[in-house]
Image (cartoon, coloured by chain):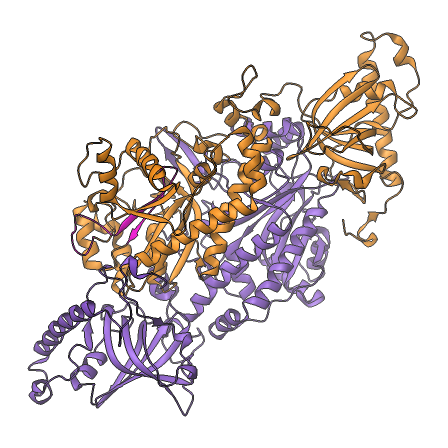
Chain colours: A purple, B orange
């Protein structure tokens, strides 16, 4: 806290609170202690309760923090608790993860995100029996303030992140109490799914109570790593002079054929939710931005209840003008993925290892430069192992996965590009192959055998685009503005759309995209 | 282009295209030239046309770029065209901005984003009359490839960004032709609104034809600067260990009282578009992320046709746990804005100056540390100049603007914070002032007298929150998951939501938020 005294900050006194605040807190504490004592009368043997409480004013329920005063007390982060603080008295605020009382003492574990430390409170000169009992009775997951001495331990505390120290508490205050019955326990949610003989938590229970579930070390790491994917995506493209743009989510017409689109009531009319920023990022190219990316929600009204479909997800989209050949763009995107994979490997190793403890997975493998196969080669590989399929048939999900295995076995990579898809299985705006319009200038990118990006050279000629839209049965009046964008000079361009949650899921080898969406949406889930 | 020959790249030959591609191009060119000649028979005196065309194969319509071949030709960027390239023969691809033919020569201006260069083509040994005529006839805004010598000029070309050189063309190819009639001219769209005697372009014409409008140097600069706001926002918060999260846009219940919300058909049921990520970013805090930000679309079904309301805009939201006082958060956000303002000033000066040419504005002023006033002080200032208002009445838009002027006059800042709003005018989740619940722990941030961020300490106690929601007439069952989030231990926290387009508009002193939204949405506009 860098506040100056002019702003009303009360400067630090030993032990910590300002005199006024301390007085207030003591009063509240006395009330709380009396209340606690009254509550326990009858259930306890009178002896302890009737003793004078030498810890009065050192424990209890903290009054609601309503910003009454500025307090210049340093609250240490758990990861700061090392032998360097040996025998110092410090304050921490953290969750009570577990507690276990035993006679005159209570051991408890404090948690902050991925850090944990062991703490101890024992009856003594400054600590009353009542105080130990109060501490033992605090509900798990409550947020508490503890004043304690940092003591270096002889034997490492294996179960905590801070293994060399423990805290010997002298004050314990509840800042925010959790209810006594929790819908799930963080320790259960943090357990590998393969742990035999222990409770694990079902996916729906997790998602229904997501705010407890995301407290696990694993989830803290997953969503930090996911933020890393976005950061690396932006870093790479910023370096290449892409412009970060924003495109509308509410659109006037279902742009890509009308299926799988959510309808919105728009004042007295209706509108739709964009299934991708496709048309808009292309319009940016026609508007001379040359290279653009956009990050945002995309919506798909698909009634698919699979491990990899969401009705709303985060799209990492990019689009780029090129000179002569769409491989200029494919190469850049491949280079970008390698940048992301290396960045994750080098900067998020701790997160990866944390996640692997709960969800073991083989490290993600990739080549440099990336492997690029043509669709017809993939069909050939599949046929060689007995799959029957036509030349221009789209890949089914099982064939996609099988292909991933074949590619991994042959080339030892979890990442590859499939190029030159059959024209018939791609959207109307896909550029046909110049030699044979059975094929197209389009590509998918795969991670661990699942598609994470679709892209193509786009048709930039308005007449060809009109013809293609007609062949796809799209009503021309609904995409007039889009087609017209190409009437004022348009450079050849290509791009792609990446599903963020899928990239995170597959990089980590997780089995469900709901593990990488904070608040997932699917046909059956709209809450929380 | 870093491709190797193995990937099918044809290496560079003089002048440029691969032999095969060149042959192809020449054939196409001959066809085009013949067609052009046929077309002009009758309108011209026969003499020129019947002459042999010494430029055959050096001009015409380029075939559609369908990625037939990889061509290792370097296309220079216009900003690379400096005297360092004196007398070198180079290729460029750019838009034809204007052209003017005069006898045996044609002057034309090429444009790439904010860069322009003058070019010239004259009848001579290698350039035929037909070729000059062809060049003069190319529609404005078409994209063309030009091979030319870079010539250093004696007198600066004042009207172009590249003032020291001009191009002497020997090949001219149309890559993508614009239609002859444009709905607006880039040069008109780029003119200051105050330019007397010249055409300017109305806002609706601009927005209806946004892809031409955004080609102006001014718009290229505006949206690059807007991307800069996002970049600086992220940079600052990343440094402070905030986690970038994504929150759902489709939600099950209208969270903030039910007014002004768009309804979505969700399979067989219904849902709503999130008016803010408010509830979700708070849930992230309860889920132990401690400090989060999220950038994404927010939706407001307000039927407001004003200069500063959009039905969809980009929200820069943040939320943060604090220790004792919400001013810890206010101070951090203020510091963040100063970081953004300084970053814009220092890194985007060129963009700012470009924009100021078309839209003149006073430089944006801010103090360090930022000015923070209390609401009651603002009321006092307004009363002093004759405004009649109650103590706890919300600021009307005119009063907000007037206050901005008073603050500017008194403190010389365009940026300030108004703290401690009346509780009654704030959302139900706002923490009341600890001493007097007529007031609240809430704040707005202002730029040039307009609100660009609202924020508050939030109620983190479930019972208090329930009581507050009831007072606001909110159906408790619609926000149960939200209220329940606070039952498992919640730290005190505060945050705010920033409108990106407003920040950009007001930083630049623009008069309409539609100038800072690529494809704005309002009650009357859903296209393009």
B283 horizontally vs A158: left or right: left
**How many numbered markers are drawn?**
0
- In the figure, A390 relative to A108: above or below? above
Q: Residue extending furthest front?
A: B410
Q: Is residue B310 visible?
A: yes
Query: x, y (%) of residue B427?
Result: 25, 46
Residue sitting nearer the eye, A394 or A415 = A415
Task: Please provide the residue range marked out in magenta.
Answer: B433-457
Query: x, y (%) of residue A501?
Result: 50, 56
Query: x, y (%) of residue A408?
Result: 66, 65
Is residue A123 within the magenta segment? no
Residue sitting nearer the eye, A319 or A80 = A80
Q: Residue extending furthest bottom?
A: A154
Is residue B444 within the magenta segment? yes
User: What's the residue at 33%, 59% (across, down)?
Assistant: B328
- In the figure, A156 relative to A379: above or below? below
User: What's the residue at 16%, 70% (across, down)?
Assistant: A23
User: What's the residue at 35%, 37% (across, down)?
Assistant: B409
Query: Picture quarter containing residue B452?
Result: top left
A51 horizontally vs A216: left or right: left
A513 horizontally vs B75: left or right: left
User: What's the residue at 57%, 24% (across, down)?
Assistant: B191
Query: x, y (%) of residue B34?
Result: 85, 19
Q: Is residue B474 visible?
A: no
């Amino acid at each position: 806290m860098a506040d100056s005294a002019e702003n009303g900050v009360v400067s630090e006194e030993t032990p910590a609170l300002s005199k006024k605040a301390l007085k207030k807190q003591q009063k509240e504490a006395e009330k709380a202690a009396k209340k606690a004592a009254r509550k326990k009368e009858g259930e306890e043997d009178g002896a302890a309760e009737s003793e004078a409480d030498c810890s009065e004013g050192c424990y209890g329920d903290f009054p609601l923090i309503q910003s009454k005063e500025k307090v210049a007390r340093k609250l240490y982060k758990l990861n700061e608790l090392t032998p360097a603080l040996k025998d110092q008295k410090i304050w921490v605020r953290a969750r009570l993860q577990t507690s276990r009382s035993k006679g005159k003492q209570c051991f408890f574990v404090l948690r902050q995100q991925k850090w944990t430390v062991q703490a101890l409170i024992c009856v003594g000169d400054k600590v009353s029996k009542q105080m130990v009992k109060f501490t033992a009775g605090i509900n798990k997951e409550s947020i508490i303030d503890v004043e304690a001495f940092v003591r270096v331990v002889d034997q490492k505390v294996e179960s905590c992140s801070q293994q060399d120290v423990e805290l010997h508490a002298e004050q314990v205050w509840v800042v925010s109490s959790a209810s006594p019955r929790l819908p799930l326990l963080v320790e259960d949610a943090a357990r590998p799914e393969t742990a035999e003989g222990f409770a694990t938590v079902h996916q729906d229970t997790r998602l229904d109570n997501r705010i407890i579930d995301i407290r696990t070390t694993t989830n803290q790491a997953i969503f930090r790593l996911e933020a890393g994917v976005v950061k690396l995506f932006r870093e790479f493209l910023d370096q290449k002079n892409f412009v970060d743009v924003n495109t509308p989510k509410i659109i006037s017409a279902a742009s890509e054929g009308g299926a799988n689109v959510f309808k919105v009531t728009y004042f007295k009319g209706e509108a739709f939710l964009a299934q991708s920023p496709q048309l808009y990022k292309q319009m940016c190219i026609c508007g001379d931005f040359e290279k653009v990316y956009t990050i945002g929600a995309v919506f798909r009204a698909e009634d698919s209840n699979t491990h990899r479909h969401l009705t709303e997800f985060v799209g990492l989209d990019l689009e780029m003008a090129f000179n002569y050949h769409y491989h200029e763009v494919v190469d850049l995107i491949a280079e970008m993925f390698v940048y992301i994979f290396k960045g994750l490997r080098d900067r998020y190793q701790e997160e990866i290892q944390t996640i692997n403890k709960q969800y073991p997975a083989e490290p993600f493998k990739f080549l440099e430069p990336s492997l690029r196969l043509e669709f017809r080669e993939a069909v050939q590989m599949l046929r060689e192992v007995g799959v029957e399929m036509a030349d221009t048939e789209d890949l089914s999900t099982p064939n996609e996965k099988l292909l991933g295995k074949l590619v991994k076995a042959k080339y030892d990579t979890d990442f590859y590009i499939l190029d030159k898809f059959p024209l018939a299985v791609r959207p109307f705006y896909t550029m046909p192959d110049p030699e044979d319009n059975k094929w197209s200038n389009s590509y998918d990118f795969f991670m661990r055998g699942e598609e994470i990006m679709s892209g193509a050279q786009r048709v930039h000629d308005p007449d060809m685009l009109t013809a293609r839209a007609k062949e796809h049965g799209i009503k021309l009046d609904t995409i007039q503005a889009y087609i017209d964008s190409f009437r004022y000079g348009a450079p050849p361009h290509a791009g792609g759309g990446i599903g963020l949650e899928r990239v995170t899921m597959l990089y980590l080898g997780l089995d469900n995209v709901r593990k990488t969406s904070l608040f997932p949406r699917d046909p059956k889930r709209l809450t929380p």
